[in-house]
Image (spheres, grey):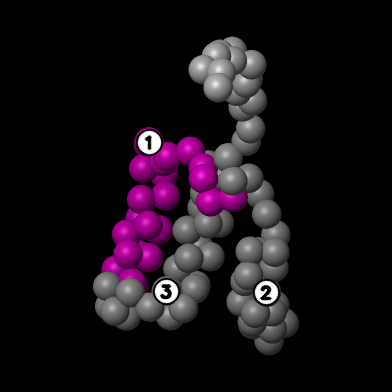
Amino acid sequence: MSTAMNFGTKTFRQRPPDKGAFPLDHFGECKSFKETYMRCLRDNHFDSSRCRVETKEYLECRMDRQLMAKEPFEKLGFKDLMEESDEENKAKL
């Protein structure tokens, strides 16, 4: 039985963070959106499905301020909210 160990053969490769891992909001640029979302969660017994509008607004704030990568909302699971806002905009015209 050999007890030799091969130190230094594995190298660490840096990779980008997975989705959902993004820089902290050190300057509180989206703090009001976060607080609105957290209030919604508390009011709805932490049922996040009832706070989708607040979630979308928070993510939109983070994307606008480059605290996360821009993604289409349809790809993030907000297709239905985008369709509703499109219908509201058409009704206003």
Judging depth in this view, the residue of 9 and 89 nearest the camera is 9
Give the alpha-carbon distance from disc 3 to disc 1, as whole Å: 24 Å
Residue 87 location in percent, x, y?
69, 83
Q: Residue furthest front?
A: 1
Judging depth in this view, the residue of 64 and 75 nearest the camera is 75
| Mark 2 burial class by Cα count in 10 Å: few <14, some 14-19, many 20+ | few
Residue 48 location in percent, x, y?
42, 74
Considering only order in the chain, which callout, 3 or 2, is on the residue closer to the N terminus? 3
The boundaries of the magenta stretch are: 19-41
Give the alpha-carbon distance from disc 1 to disc 2, as whole Å: 30 Å
Residue 88 location in percent, x, y?
64, 82
Who's the residue at 63% across and 70% down the image? 77
Considering only order in the chain, which callout, 2 or 1, is on the residue closer to the N terminus? 1
On the image, numbered disc 3 is attached to which residue?
48
Quadrant including the N terminus: top right
On the image, numbered disc 2 is attached to which residue?
79
On the image, numbered disc 1 is attached to which residue?
26
Queried whether the magenta region covers residue 34, the answer comes back as: yes
51 displayed left or right of 42 = right
- Disc 2 marks a residue whose amino acid type is Lys
* Placement of 87 over or under 19, stated as above or below: below
| Mark 3 burial class by Cα count in 10 Å: few <14, some 14-19, many 20+ | some
